Image (tube, helix red, strand yellow):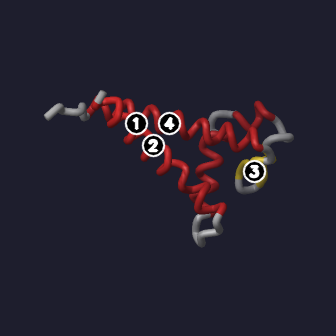
Amino acid sequence: MLSNNVFLKRFIITVLLLQIPLLLALIDVQGSMLPALFWINIPVLWTGIAQLLGESHFIIGEFGASPQSALAYGVIITFWTAVAFLITKITIKLKPVVNE
């Protein structure tokens, strides 16, 4: 039970950390556009999702892909959530929880 709580806490923190670039861009924090571009383009362009979903969901311009629908944002958020899950699984295995 203890390890499940630790896993869940680490997972939630990791998910929140990986979603920060979008949150900062949405509230117009100065200097947040470059991290937001990386946040969008890493899962979309490097995996080929933009070409797969087409121009109705992503427009590819000079600075990379631009999401055009809720499905596009959902795909990106799902990608980063999966990355957070993998990071959490790896860190739990590397540093197991010790019962005191």
Rounded to the nearest whole Å, what is the CA distance between mark 1 and mark 3? 32 Å
Are the residues flagged by discs 4 and 1 in contact, CB closer than 8 Å? Answer: no
Ranked by sequence position, the earlier of labels 1 and 3 is: 1
Ranked by sequence position, the earlier of labels 4 and 3 is: 3
Q: Nearer the viewer, mark 4 or mark 3?
A: 4
Are the residues flagged by discs 1 and 2 in contact, CB closer than 8 Å? Answer: yes
Measuring from the top left, give residue 35's x and y in whole percent: 57, 58
Q: Residue at x 23, y 33 (%)?
A: 97
- Give the amino acid type for the residue marked by disc 3 in the picture: Ser
Measuring from the top left, give residue 45's x and y in whole percent: 67, 41
Q: Which residue is mark 3?
A: 66
- Give the amino acid type for the residue marked by disc 1 in the picture: Leu
Q: Is residue 31 left or right of residue 2?
A: right
Instruction: Name which quarter of the figure residue 52 lies in.
Output: top right
Q: Which mark is residue 12?
A: 2
Are the residues flagged by discs 3 and 2 in contact, CB closer than 8 Å? Answer: no
Q: Which residue is mark 1?
A: 8
